[in-house]
Image (cartoon, coloured by chain):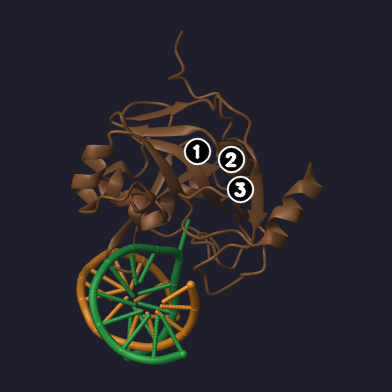
Chain colours: A brown, B orange, C green
DNA sequence: CTTTCGATGATCT
DNA sequence: GATCATCGAAAGG
């Protein structure tokens, strides 16, 4: 049996994909872990790189769904997204945190830190732990070096407002595993309640 | 525990 | 020249 073919349908809204990706295991060259935090970025979204239309940087966001969109944040940190919806739509999901499960020692070496809770708990840390850089921009998520493995257990989902942005900060487009120690930041108790109400 | 601030470079105005 | 979907160290309570 093979779990390497991605059953995630990226041709859906970034909110739907961001929610569905929680609990999947993301590996790059066999190294990675469980996706515990994502954020959706949509067109007509002031915080999205795609808001003002296609440019050289955001070109992958306007390409086919299921491909990587990689950008350099604050001149220092490589951040990894997956494109959603449909070509020309400008939608993507930012991978914000993983629970490390595969290749812990490699990630410790890349990150220069020992604590598992700090290896991939933030978009910049994910990029460093997975050794993401510009060369991954535009690559398909369902092909090597990427690999997506389905969740094995039930996920307790949480929803909250996006963080670290200066515009459209009220939209509840951040998704995660409730109470995971590997989040970039805890979700509020109100967010836990709101997520329960969704079910 | 919290807040503040510097690093660093691509992108866009 | 300003902005930025971040991080880590330092300082303060």
Q: Nearer the viewer, mark 1 or mark 3?
A: 3
Kindly report the distance in space between the C-alpha atoms of the residues bearing marks 1 and 2: 6 Å
Q: Is residue A92 visible?
A: no
* Residue under the image location 29 percent in, 46 percent down: A129
Q: Is residue C6 above or below residue C10?
A: above
Q: Which mark is residue A86?
A: 2
Residue A195 placement, left or right of C5:
right
Secondary structure found at label 3: loop
Kindly report the distance in space between the C-alpha atoms of the residues bearing marks 1 and 3: 31 Å
The chain carrying label 3 is: A
**Nearer to me, C10 or A16:** C10
Q: Which mark is residue A126?
A: none
Q: Is residue B5 above or below residue A44?
A: below
**Nearer to me, A10 or A158:** A158
**Nearer to me, A124 or B3:** B3
The chain carrying label 1 is: A
* Residue under the image location 56 percent in, 35 percent down: A10
- Callout 1 and callout 2 share a chain: yes
Secondary structure found at label 1: loop
* Residue under the image location 26 percent in, 43 percent down: A107
Residue A126 placement, left or right of A7:
left
Q: Is residue A43 visible?
A: yes
Kindly report the distance in space between the C-alpha atoms of the residues bearing marks 3 and 2: 30 Å
Q: Which mark is residue A178?
A: 3
Residue bearing the label numbered 1: A64
Q: Residue B13, located in which quarter of the rendered image?
A: bottom left
Count the numbered circles shown.
3
């Amino acid at each position: 049996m093979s779990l390497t073919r991605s059953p995630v349908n990226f041709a859906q809204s970034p909110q739907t994909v961001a929610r569905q990706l929680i609990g999947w295991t993301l590996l790059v060259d066999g190294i990675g872990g469980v996706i515990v935090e994502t954020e959706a970025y949509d067109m007509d979204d002031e915080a999205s790189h795609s808001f003002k239309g296609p440019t050289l940087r955001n070109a992958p966001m306007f390409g086919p769904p299921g491909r990587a969109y990689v950008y350099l944040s604050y001149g220092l940190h490589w951040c990894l997204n997956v494109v959603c919806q449909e070509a020309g739509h400008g939608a993507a999901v930012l991978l914000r945190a993983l629970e490390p499960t595969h290749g812990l020692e490699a990630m410790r070496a890349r990150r220069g830190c020992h604590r598992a809770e700090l290896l991939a708990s933030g978009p910049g840390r994910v990029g460093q732990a997975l050794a993401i850089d510009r060369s991954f921009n535009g690559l398909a998520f369902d092909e090597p070096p990427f690999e997506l493995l389905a969740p094995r257990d039930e996920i307790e989902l949480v929803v909250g407002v996006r963080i670290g942005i200066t515009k459209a900060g009220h939209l509840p487009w951040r998704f995660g595993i409730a109470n995971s120690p590997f989040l970039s930041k805890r979700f509020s108790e109100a967010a836990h309640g709101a997520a329960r109400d969704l079910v």
